[in-house]
Image (cartoon, coloured by chain):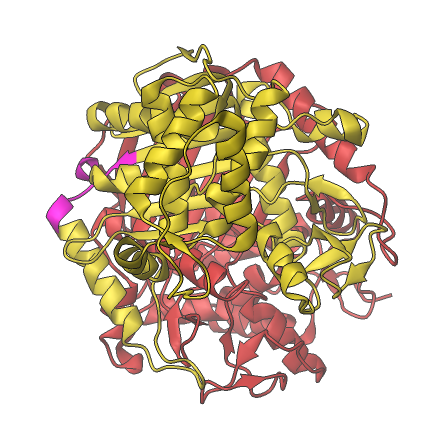
Chain colours: A yellow, B red
């Protein structure tokens, strides 16, 4: 696995990242949650949402766009619903708290629906949906953000690449989990192509003038998945999250000069108690049967194996737990700079073999 | 609008369709609901889900796959959740009842989550989501069905083109509503290309051997939206609907010979009471502001106007209310045959001008 890059043990990386966030002023417990979610993304191969982001987080703390010690509170609470006012908390702190409250509510009332107001950088949102699956529930998460994707028919950012995640528990099979942006391809993949010097497939992105481009160096604006579909879905996600907590992002942001656009996110964490609807053991057995049926489908030419949602990440996780998390040059450089700046010892690496 | 085809007045068509379903054994009230939903699809230009389907419905009744007088009942009811056992009712009968119950629950408990077991042909599912929007709620609907779409990497049907619909109310603006299949393009669009003799865009469909094709005459299997994304989303929709009501469709169907595959659907109707989260008037004003901000985005080359979700259908509805619903030859032939077979007088048409 990526033998070209030095690697780092997941537990050691987690400890380092925890220390970084403690130095930035977070509580030990919150810093540990943030480290857990970032390193989890790396473990599953979602490196674009992993420790690659640390320098950006440092900047957010320095600019005051994220609070290390937010005063989070639940508002308008009912047996099934609530708003978590996140007070500019980093996403993992707000989202784990929101999902845990949703799970509690669902345990007692069948459904838990917790809306989150004003958080930041929620990371790999499948993590929060899987928290519900681990509690024998269906987990559903939607996060919205500042416009960074072209709206269908527009030559400028009009909506965000807002992701949706859904997770369900299996019996012997791992949970099925989807975590997908509403863009054709995440901005991270465009950056990867830029770094690799390869062309983009047609239909992925626009350049800064709003014209279609396959030049990764010129691409700045991802296009929505399926044109009107992805754009419309993202727009309705704004209505299901931001507008429901009275904190519009898109209409507010589009009225501001680009330089004034403060990073912010809203979200919703939903838990559905399987036991309120059907037998839990039967449900999980049916998830296993579904995964098996789909994996046994006849394969298209060039397809070696049919994968179910979550399976690729599960495999990478096993490999990276064993061999470490590879650190490409840019990511490693970021860690070294942060360590120097915060006077934290760089953790030991596993040499590239 | 489609001056080449004869048209029919919406109210007259609705009356005709109601009579058809009464003759098929449905109650007056249920027949009127079925007619309302089918003609609504035609009014909004979603002709693939309109009266075009009548001959197919007749066949379903004759084969006993749909019950004209189903014994529907709510099971496992809580303050926020329930299962509606639909007993092979046609979708509109089950889905309006499910959404109305979800709205009732949400009014009292913030959220209403009603799962639907064993219905058939739910039609244009945006209709049910809009029912919630009309009650000042967010409406969310997902419907799953027998596999009719290629799973990503497979050369055979493994999932369904299962749609999701979300609707929210505006203040002076019409509700925003998205109603989208998880396929790149609905089967109806492939049939349209077949009838028109035009080629399909690459990436839309597979032929009967599971190979990619742009020949509309050979295309039988739609491809999922965004490959793994649409396939995974559809798979998780099965988990959120069918498995939650203990009635798996995909794993059960894939184990059967194609000839044994009985049509069936499961679904969920969710209502979220806006008033439980925020000020309703403020919410609706924010929906208007969002629509206005998106419509004012700079347009891409070749785009005359940026549309928000639901806008195209709203305009077609106004035009078809005024000028009638156009009936292409195949649709008209179906109506004439059904009228003859059930001994119902053909309703008056508006001549093509």
Tell me the residue at 43%/26% (across/down): A21
Q: Nearer the viewer, residue B171 or A19?
A: A19
Which quarter of the image is occupied by the N terminus of chain B?
bottom right
Magenta region includes residue B170: no
Q: Is residue A157 left or right of residue A143?
A: right
Which quarter of the image is occupied by the C terminus of chain B?
bottom right
What percent of the width, then of the height, locates residue B180?
55, 54
Q: Is residue B163 left or right of residue A325?
A: right
Q: Nearer the viewer, residue A168 or A276?
A: A168
Tell me the residue at 32%/46% (across/down): A10
Q: Nearer the viewer, residue A336 or B203?
A: A336
Q: Is residue B177 above or below residue A108?
A: below
User: What count of labels does the image hold?
Assistant: 0
What percent of the width, then of the height, locates residue B14?
58, 51
What percent of the width, then of the height, locates residue A96?
35, 29
Residue B333 in sight here? no
What percent of the width, then of the height, locates residue B308?
71, 42
Q: Nearer the viewer, residue B292 or B10?
A: B292
Tell me the residue at 35%/66% (across/down): B146
Q: Is residue A257 left or right of residue A235?
A: right
Using the rendered view, name the quadrant where residue B84 is placed. top left
Residue B224 in sight here? yes
Numbered range of the magenta stretch? A272-281
Magenta region includes residue A280: yes
Tell me the residue at 83%/37% (across/down): B296
Using the rendered view, name the quadrant where residue B307 is placed. top right
């Amino acid at each position: 696995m990526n033998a070209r890059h030095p690697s780092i043990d997941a537990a050691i990386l987690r400890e380092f990242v925890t220390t970084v966030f403690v130095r930035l002023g977070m509580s030990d417990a919150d810093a540990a949650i943030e480290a857990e979610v970032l390193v989890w993304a790396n473990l599953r191969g979602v490196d674009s949402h992993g420790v690659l982001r640390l320098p950006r987080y440092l900047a957010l703390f320095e600019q005051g766009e994220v609070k290390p010690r937010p005063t989070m509170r639940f508002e308008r609470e009912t047996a099934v619903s609530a708003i978590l006012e996140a007070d500019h908390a980093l996403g993992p702190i707000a989202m784990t708290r929101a999902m845990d409250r949703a799970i509690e509510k669902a345990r007692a009332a069948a459904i838990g629906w917790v809306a989150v107001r004003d958080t930041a950088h929620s990371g790999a949102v499948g993590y929060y949906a899987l928290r519900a699956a681990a509690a024998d529930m269906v987990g559903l998460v939607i996060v919205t953000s500042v416009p960074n994707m072209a709206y269908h028919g527009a030559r400028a950012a009009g909506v965000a690449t807002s992701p949706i995640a859904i997770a369900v528990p299996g019996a012997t099979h791992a949970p099925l989990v989807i975590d997908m942006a509403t863009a054709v391809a995440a901005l991270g993949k465009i950056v990867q192509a830029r770094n690799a010097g390869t062309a983009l497939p047609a239909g992925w992105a626009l350049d800064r003038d709003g014209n279609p481009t396959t030049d990764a160096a010129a691409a700045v604006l991802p296009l929505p998945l399926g044109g009107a579909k992805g754009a419309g879905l993202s727009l309705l996600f704004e209505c299901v999250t931001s507008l429901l907590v009275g904190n519009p992002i898109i209409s507010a942001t589009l009225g501001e000069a680009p330089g004034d656009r403060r990073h912010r996110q809203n979200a919703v964490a939903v838990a559905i108690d399987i036991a309120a609807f059907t037998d839990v053991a039967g449900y999980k057995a049916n998830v296993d049967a579904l995964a098996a049926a789909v994996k046994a489908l006849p394969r298209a030419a060039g397809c070696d194996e049919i994968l179910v949602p979550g399976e690729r990440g599960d495999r990478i996780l096993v490999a990276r737990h064993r061999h470490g998390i590879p650190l490409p040059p840019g990511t490693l450089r970021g860690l070294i700079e942060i360590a120097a700046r915060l006077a934290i010892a760089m953790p030991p690496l596993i040499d590239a073999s």
